[in-house]
Amino acid sequence: MINRAQGTLKMMRNMWSRISIPLVILMVWHLSLGAHAEVTNLRVARQYGIGYLQIMVMEHEKLIEKHAKAQSLGDVTITWSTFTDGTVANDAIISGNLEFAAGGLGSFVTLWDRTRESLAVKGVAALNSMPMLLNTRNPNVRSIKDLTDQDRIAVAGVKVSSQAVTLQLASSQAFGDAHWSKLDHLTVNMAHPTAVQALLSGRSEITAHFASPPFQYEELKQPGVRTILNSYEVWGGPQTFIAAWTTTKFREENPRMYGAFMAALGEATDFVNNDRREAARIYLEMAGDKSTSVGDLARMLANPQIRFTLTPENVVKFASFRVGTGVIKTKPDSWKDLFFPEIHHRPGS
């Protein structure tokens, strides 16, 4: 009896020794999967205007949630934020409080340059190309050469935003390369909706607003307001207005969530291009705009100068100018240096 019991115990010990090692390996593997599980809570930020229409469609139609499920990520939670300018979004990216930011080239290129050796921020894709108009109510100003110390120009992001940088390039063209910052002291940081009110009230120090759609067109409906500068003329053609960006670390650690964002952005872009009227309705609903009709906004979206495309346009020229002024250090050899490879097949510039 004793010998039989001892034999049974020895056999069980041998079995456990054969089972325990693979079991431990399996447990470690499961733990490692949990440690590298992709995020299911995503934070996305935009600013104001129809330049963010695809982001608004993504939120309204729950497109990231849809494509996350298609990537087997299950139910995900998206937190949507609206910031006044790109500097706030960049600070949130750096501090780890934001995964995706959408904004102008000024903020994007600055963060790309400053994080090359750390977070390695790059563009996900362009969102659109749109002209930016510098409008004024000052009857004595016909061009930027007429601006004086009595004028103040509202911009969303002093010295950093796409409008601010465009004004700098225009200054270098008008006054000479050495005077690219000649008009910087006239600029005042102000969100676009607030800037419209300030310009049109006639009671503010603001006499000009370097705006974006739809705000610039709202201003031009008012008597006495006219355009003195068009960004397409300054840059020599259409240029990306809004792009989206994130960190290399996020993309590498969350490939399926990154793919879900990309797929959602692509679907939202198709949505806007295929049904401008419904896209206009969504924008007006989410922006709380009761003064603009769906028809008017749909016609604005049909403006041939306004293009919703994931293809970056004229971004190298933008970055090169920033290098020339000493604001950033790295000149990209190609637009592809600025963006992740998922869009490298596109005919960017």
Image (cartoon, helix red, strand yellow):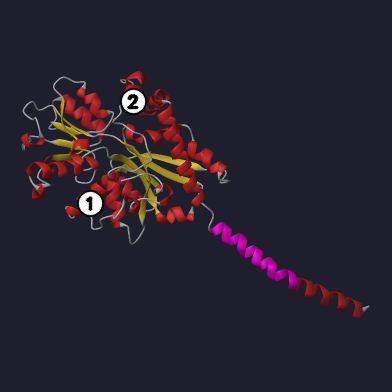
Q: Is residue 30 left or right of residue 201?
A: right
Q: Is residue 229 visible?
A: yes
Disc 1 secondary structure class: helix
The answer for how far apart the CA atoms under marks 2 and 1 are is 31 Å
Look at the picture and state if 217 lies above or below 83: above
> What residue lies at 57% left-to-right and 57% top-to-bottom?
34
> Residue 211's spot in the image, x, y percent?
22, 33
Disc 2 secondary structure class: loop
- Mark 2 nearby-residue class (10 Å; few <14, some 14–19, many ≥20): some
Q: Amino acid at mark 1?
A: Ser
Q: Which residue is mark 1?
A: 320
In magenta, the rendered stretch is 18-35
> What residue lies at 33% left-to-right and 31% top-to-bottom?
50
Q: Amino acid at mark 2?
A: Ala
Look at the picture and state if 143 lies above or below 245: above
Q: Is residue 75 visible?
A: no
N-term mark: 2 or 1: 2
Q: Main secondary structure of the magenta part?
A: helix
Q: Nearer the viewer, residue 180 or 311?
A: 311
Q: Which residue is mark 2?
A: 302
